[in-house]
Image (cartoon, rainbow, N blue to C red):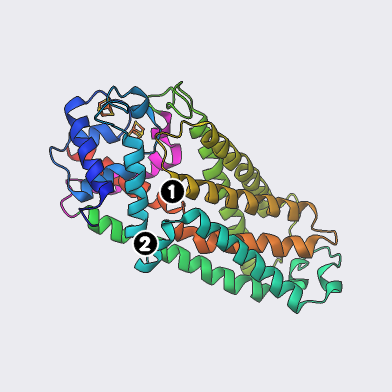
Amino acid sequence: MNPETSALKESERLMTICNACRYCESFCAVFPAMERRRTFSSGDLTHLANLCHGCQGCYTSCQYAPPHEFAVNVPRAFAALRVQTYADYAWPESFGRVFKRNGVAVSLAMALGLGLVLLLTFGLREPSVIFGTYAGAGAFYRVIPYAAMVWPFGLVFAFAIFAMIMGGVRYWRATNRKSRAKLSARTILAGVWDVLTLKNLGGGGGGCNYPLESFSTARRTWHHFTFYGFMLCFAATSVATLYHHAFGWAAPYEFTSLPVLLGTAGGIGLLIGPVGLLWLKLKADPAPQLREMLGMDVAFLLLLFLVSFTGLALLALRETSAMGTLLAVHLGFVLALFATLPYGKMVHGVYRFLALVRDAGERKTT
Ligand code: SF4
Ligand code: SF4
């Protein structure tokens, strides 16, 4: 990462002030991690920025926040550095540019994904096939063949996972050159536990100063809905894949089957969570927020909502003549989601996890 960038310079300036002040040392994991250092390398600053979850607590409490001449605004400075992290460690490198105007890029991906699947479906299938009514095993594949569904989507998804792993490896290598973190299975598990419980979003227990100055656990709650909704949908797809290949049971499955139960629960979570998070974003004080990050957040949450909404609509109307169109629309949004996973807000999960692991390692060492 270029040490001369303004995001790094501003973060270093703020951490130097905060390290002298230390008023916020009990607010989150960032300040204790900051206090372990006297100087800040670009790797340290990037680590601290990814440890910050933008709760706004330190901004709300800061006596040096604007209009004070020190203009301390840690959440905003760290948000700028996180956007730079996402761009700098993207794989392939040239794709990092997508983060500059991410909201526009994700919207374009949505339009392209939707347009492509609709065009292929309506271009290659007769209207009588698309608007037919089907029931029982293999119904979906009578409109869109199994191979046409699995291969392109599987390849895009595999690429997305590989690109995110490569980004994580590049980030870890670049930010841990002189790390004092002691890594072990225990510290990795501690990082996993922090992700699963979103412990840091709970503040000291009473929540964060988000979206307004009063303490609230709303963000943690909506984030849980979103995270576990996504994981349940992923589990549903995995079980369905196992059913198909191991037992030869073709979708769609009964409403009481495991993939449908998991997918329904996950889909509901992915409706509630993104709506809750979007609502909080609208209410939140804009001063500590970064416009680029806001666009990225909104685009990602909207895409998750649309994937879930169209998936649940497909489930509800799968035995009607709307099934073919809904299937194409749902797959269009899924394609856009897969394609943008390594170049949108999803990557924050990778870097935050690595920052939490490193933090757990540092806590163990000191
Ligand atoms: S954010 Fe403000 S109050 Fe908190 S440690 Fe930094 S300078 Fe002090
Ligand atoms: S915004 Fe929240 S998480 Fe980030 S440094 Fe401030 S108190 Fe910590």
Magenta segment includes 179 = yes
- Residue 129 drawn at (x, y percent): 83, 73
Residue depicted at x 62% and y 59%? 333
Residue carrying label 1: 292
Residue carrying label 2: 90
Residue depicted at x 33% and y 49%? 354
Q: Residue furthest left?
A: 38
- Residue 360 drawn at (x, y percent): 28, 41
User: Measured along the vertical axis of the image, is residue 115 above or below residue 59?
Assistant: below
Nearest to the observer: residue 147 or residue 275:
275
Residue 310 in view of the camera? yes
Magenta segment includes 43 = no
Quarter where residue 123 is shown:
bottom right
Residue depicted at x 32% and y 42%? 78
- Residue 188 drawn at (x, y percent): 32, 47
For mark 1, does the 10 Å Cα neighbourhood hold few (<14), some (14 to 19), or many (20 or more) residues? some
